[in-house]
Amino acid sequence: MFGFLKKKLSEGIDKLKSAVKTKQDVPAESVQEAVRTIEEADKAKQEIAYKEKLIEEAGYKLKPEIKEAIEEPYEQVIAEAAEIAPEIAEPAEEVRAETSEPLIEKEGILAKVKKALIEKKISEDDVKEVLWELQMGLVESDVALEAAEKITGDIKTALVGQSVKRTTDIEKIVRDSMRKSITEIMSVDSLDLMEKAKSKKPFVIIFLGFNGSGKTTTIARIGYMMKQKGFNCVFAAADTWRAAAIEQIEEHGQRLGIPVIKQKYGADPAAVIFDAVKHATAKGMDVVLADTAGRSHANLNLMDEMKKIIRVNKPDLKILVLDALTGNDIYEQCRLFNGTVGVDGLILTKADVYDKGGAALSAAWTIKKPLLFLGIGQEYGDLQPFDAEKIVESLLD
């Protein structure tokens, strides 16, 4: 599951590691030697400063030419260190800009040079190209552009401007940033369907979706799950449009021992659901699970019919069922249904055969609604509760 997306994330991590490492690589032996030299120079500086203090306390002053001779070795130390890591010359230049005093008399210069040798400040240029490639790779994986921009933007914030030790594991920084960013995207909201269904009786759930998204099978799976949890359910066969749709949900009802309320083909679907709610109320049943006809962008009559269904029955939840294999069109489906009647939660079907993974990553992000379940197999029990943290760990392990 999600193999293609996992591959793109892994490639992005490797390229970021390589980009940053190229900019900061200095042979460990050279760094250690330069640091030792600076530490020795710093120690010598302290000894000279102590002796100079004794001389001044005795009423004498060092001649300028002697001070210059003392200063020269420190200039040499800085120059040698700069050959190993050119960026360390910057602290010395900053000190020179602040004062005309010799470097030896300016407190902390050697410490600054030592820090610059050990650490590297990551610039935007270090990662700009790689982050762009990662963003395009995410879009190829069906991740919505806005979600891809968030992920790469968060990584940029985590890296750019940070001073990292040359021994720092850049991969850890990138992975931690990805983990946080993707978890935020996939956890835009939370909704416990079983707990929610206990809030009133009967609890009415209407399932929406495009043609072939797997609504009827998903309804059967939710019915099976709810029955396992002790809920009494009834199916409303409100897809009066598609041939054999009523027979399909009746078959599921017979297998699961769940009653089905139906009318003839061409009947008003809003009336079918209304009858199912009346039946559930009369029988003291817990939940009404209502099927509806598949919609499409072009069929305005069916979209208007859906508005009527919602207006007449005022469901407690509207769940949009999405086919993972649809790919990028999922974002338009989310926007269309949410904009037309509002959506409370999402279910993604065929997730087990969907390699790209981006739809799961960003369907919820597109309309800021929770992803409730993933359809992963052929059996009634093959409906996996969505767990953002588990998905992220599987993507980044």
Image: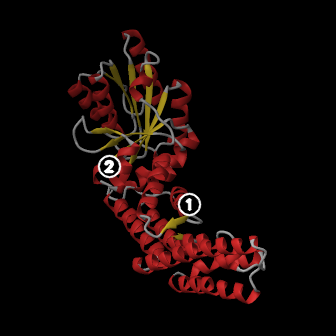
Q: Is residue 103 above or below residue 337?
A: below
Residue 379 or residue 88, whichever sits in front: 88
Disc number for residue 318? none
Which residue is depicted at the point 24% across and 35% down? 380
Residue assigned mark 1: 153
Residue 137 or residue 203, whichever sits in front: 137
Is 330 left, or right, of 73 in this rendering?
left
**Colour scheme of the picture:** secondary structure
Q: Is residue 63 above or below residue 47?
A: below
Which residue is depicted at the point 33% across and 31% down? 222
**Which corner quadrant of the image does residue 156 belong to?**
bottom right
Label 1 element class: helix
Query: From where the camera sits, is residue 55 visible?
Result: yes
List x then y, in percent, for residue 186.
Answer: 46, 46
The three-letter code of the residue at mark 2 reads Ala
The three-letter code of the residue at mark 1 reads Gly
